[in-house]
Image (cartoon, helix red, strand yellow):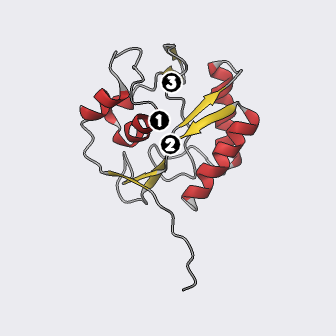
Amino acid sequence: MGDRAAYLATAAEAIDKELGHVRSTSSCYQTAAWGMEGQPDFLNQVLLIDTPLAPQALLDGLLGIEQSLGRFRGEKYGPRTIDLDILFFIAWIIALPGLQVPHPRIPERRFVLEPMVELAPGLRHPVLHRTMRELLDACPDPLPVHKFVPAVYNKD
């Protein structure tokens, strides 16, 4: 909802300032809303960060950033200003209430795999033992994913 690109940029800035150093970012990608039809397209981006925080503290920080950007958790897959997830945490496998790492739906979401492949095509999933490129090649998600190029004002 709202200025999607601005929310992504603001979230990345807050992550870099509050949670850890953002080492690299993927391009922004646009796709039809996943999980619920009839809402505006989503923008997605993957960040690679170095953080001194433990996984739960990182998640708590991400949820705080979401809240500061107007996110409230209502309808599942419903419209939202921002949605921040931990996809991987080193090569750790974490299964706690409210925190599963690697994110359990990575293999079925093209909108996650496209930016992951841009940043780390050879990264191996610690549970599935397949690279991001291999997961993207096998992804069943039919929704097209496109690099997002924001409109730029041109006076001429």
Q: CA distance from mark 3 to mark 1?
A: 13 Å
Looking at marks 3 and 2 on the same chain, the residue that comes earlier in the sequence is marked by 2
Nearest to the observer: residue 57 or residue 156: 156
Residue 3 is drawn in which quadrant? Answer: bottom right
Residue underneath mark 1: 119
Q: Is residue 49 left or right of residue 107?
A: right
Q: SS class of the residue under badge 1?
A: helix
How crowded is the residue under tag 3: few (<14 C-alpha within 10 Å), some, or many (20+)?
some
- Observer-side mark, 3 or 1, equals 1
Q: SS class of the residue under badge 2?
A: loop
Looking at marks 1 and 2 on the same chain, the residue that comes earlier in the sequence is marked by 2
- Observer-side mark, 3 or 2, equals 2
Residue at the farthest right position: 17
How crowded is the residue under tag 2: few (<14 C-alpha within 10 Å), some, or many (20+)?
some
Residue at the farthest front position: 156
Nearest to the observer: residue 50 or residue 109: 50
Q: CA distance from mark 1 to mark 2?
A: 6 Å
Looking at marks 3 and 1 on the same chain, the residue that comes earlier in the sequence is marked by 3
Q: Which mark is residue 94?
A: none
Residue underneath mark 3: 88
Nearest to the observer: residue 112 or residue 67: 112
Q: Is residue 60 left or right of residue 127?
A: right
Q: Which mark is residue 26?
A: 2
How crowded is the residue under tag 1: few (<14 C-alpha within 10 Å), some, or many (20+)?
some
Q: Please say if 137 is above or below 4.
A: above
Q: Residue at x 49, y 48 (%)?
A: 27
**Which part of the image, by quadrant, shows the C terminus?**
bottom right
| Labelled pair 1, 2 in contact (Cβ < 8 Å) | yes
- Going by the numbered disc 2, the residue's amino acid type is Ser
- Going by the numbered disc 3, the residue's amino acid type is Phe
- Going by the numbered disc 1, the residue's amino acid type is Leu
Could you say where residue 100 lies in the image, as x and y percent from the top left? 49, 21
